[in-house]
Image: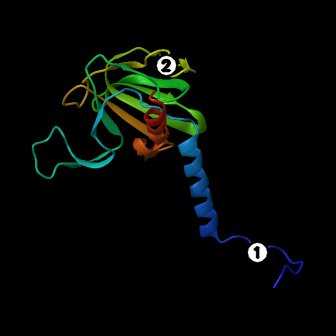
Amino acid sequence: MGWRGGAKKAPHPRTRALAALLLAFAVLVTLPPFAWPIKGRVSSGFFIRHAPDSSRLLAIEMHRGIDIAAASGTPVHSTAPGIVVETGYSASLGNYVRVRHLLGITSTYGHLSRIDAPKGRLILLRGARSLGAVGTTGRSTGPHLHFAIEVGKLFLPPRPLLAFHDLRRHILHF
């Protein structure tokens, strides 16, 4: 009926795993507060999609970020404070910048027409300086920003992490 003075029974491993998952989700959603890197329409979502540069019917691929359509040359800003850990060019992303944030979270910005932020740049205020500009470099069918968020090697869907920014813009209009 009550505690009998013995050792407490350890929680079931599934209970601990669920608690850890819920805590990780709560931390990721609340810290750091992610903001949209540019204004624009999401032209391709996270997860499975038809390969945009293929005419084959069954050209299915995993899309590990979102594509945000915008005019070429639109300034791209970091989604949150952090440090630029990598810049470069790849066949798929074209010109890209990677920023490391709190808790080991990394954001990637691809298809840039130019890179403005050198490796090692500390970003304290979002919007103070651009990382680069929207372009269509790499594997791209038109000007847009490829935006991805990952923790370790796990890619996360960016839209839920941007929900707070969406809500703030809706209520406060900025």
Q: Residues within 10 Å of mark 2 (few under 14, many from 20)?
A: some
Identify the residue at horizontal 20%, vertical 27% (top origin). Answer: 142
- Residues at marks 2 and 1 touching, judged by CB atoms closer than 8 Å: no
Front one among 25 and 83: 25
Q: SS of the residue at dot 2?
A: loop
In the rendered image, which residue does mark 1 sit on? Answer: 9
Residue 126: percent from the left, percent from the top? 51, 22
Residue 89: percent from the left, percent from the top? 34, 24
Front one among 60 and 169: 169
Residue 62: percent from the left, percent from the top? 30, 48
Marker count (numbered): 2
> In which quadrant will I find the N terminus?
bottom right
Q: Amino acid at mark 1?
A: Lys
- Position of residue 77 relative to residue 105, above or below, is above
Q: Residue 22's quadrant in the figure?
A: bottom right
Identify the image's colour scheme: rainbow, by chain, secondary structure or one colour. Answer: rainbow
In the rendered image, which residue does mark 2 sit on? Answer: 119
Q: SS of the residue at dot 1?
A: loop
Identify the residue at horizontal 43%, vertical 36% (top origin). Answer: 170
Judge from the rendering whether residue 106 lies leftward or rightward of residue 26; answer left or right: left
Q: Amino acid at mark 2?
A: Lys
Q: Residues within 10 Å of mark 1 (few under 14, many from 20)?
A: few
Judge from the rendering whether residue 171 lies leftward or rightward of residue 1; answer left or right: left
Q: CA distance from mark 2 to mark 1?
A: 50 Å
Q: What residue occupies the far right of the structure in this picture?
A: 5
Identify the residue at horizontal 46%, vertical 27% (top origin). Answer: 174
Residue 94: percent from the left, percent from the top? 30, 26
Q: Earlier in the sequence, mark 2 or mark 1?
A: 1
- Position of residue 2 relative to residue 91, above or below, is below
